Amino acid sequence: MSLDAAEFFRMVPTALDRYTYVTTPNCIIVADSDRQVRIELSPQPELRIASLSLPRTSVELAFDGYSAEAATHFVERFLRHYQRGGG
């Protein structure tokens, strides 16, 4: 994602508003009934395009107890909260 960890964590309450979760400096663990999602962040080097530099963070989601369909639904909903407009 083209954002830093601080910005990512500022958006978590909205993205996970219907879930119970705990956070650490580089991980979020989401409890969903008897299922769990682990979201791990790791910083990446800035993306530089000419004089423009963009922060980057690698975000990895690991699902435990989710069907493929339920995991896809979670990811789609989660990513909608991180979409940005632009032209």
Image (spheres, grey):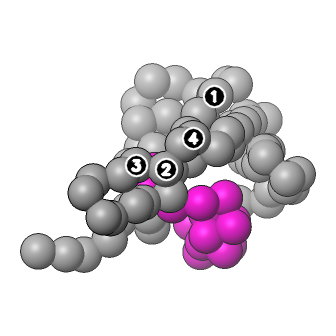
* Tag of residue 63: 1
Q: Check disc 2 and report its element: helix, strand or loop.
A: strand
Inter-mark Cα distance, 3 to 1: 28 Å
Q: Position of residue 17 (x, y in %)?
A: 64, 71
Q: How many marks on residues? A: 4
Q: Which residue is mark 4?
A: 44
Q: Amino acid at mark 2?
A: Glu
* Tag of residue 50: none
Q: Amino acid at mark 3?
A: Leu
Mark 3 touches mark 2? (CB < 8 Å): yes
Q: Amino acid at mark 4?
A: Gln
Q: Main secondary structure of the magenta part?
A: helix
> Residue at 57% of width from left, 41% of height from top?
44
Mark 4 touches mark 2? (CB < 8 Å): yes
Q: Which residue is mark 3?
A: 47
Inter-mark Cα distance, 3 to 2: 4 Å
* Tag of residue 46: 2
Where 48 falls versus 82 (above or below)? Answer: above
76 or 56: nearer the viewer: 56
Position of residue 36 in the picture relative to residue 11 (left or right)? right
Mark 3 touches mark 1? (CB < 8 Å): no
Q: Check disc 4 and report its element: helix, strand or loop.
A: strand
Magenta-colored span: 1-16
Q: Position of residue 47 (x, y in %)?
A: 40, 49
Inter-mark Cα distance, 2 to 1: 28 Å
Q: Residues within 10 Å of mark 3 (few under 14, many from 20)?
A: few
Q: Residues within 10 Å of mark 4 (few under 14, many from 20)?
A: some
Foreground disc of the pair 2, 1: 2
Q: Check disc 3 and report its element: helix, strand or loop.
A: strand
> Residue at 30% of width from left, 64% of height from top?
51
Q: Amino acid at mark 1?
A: Phe
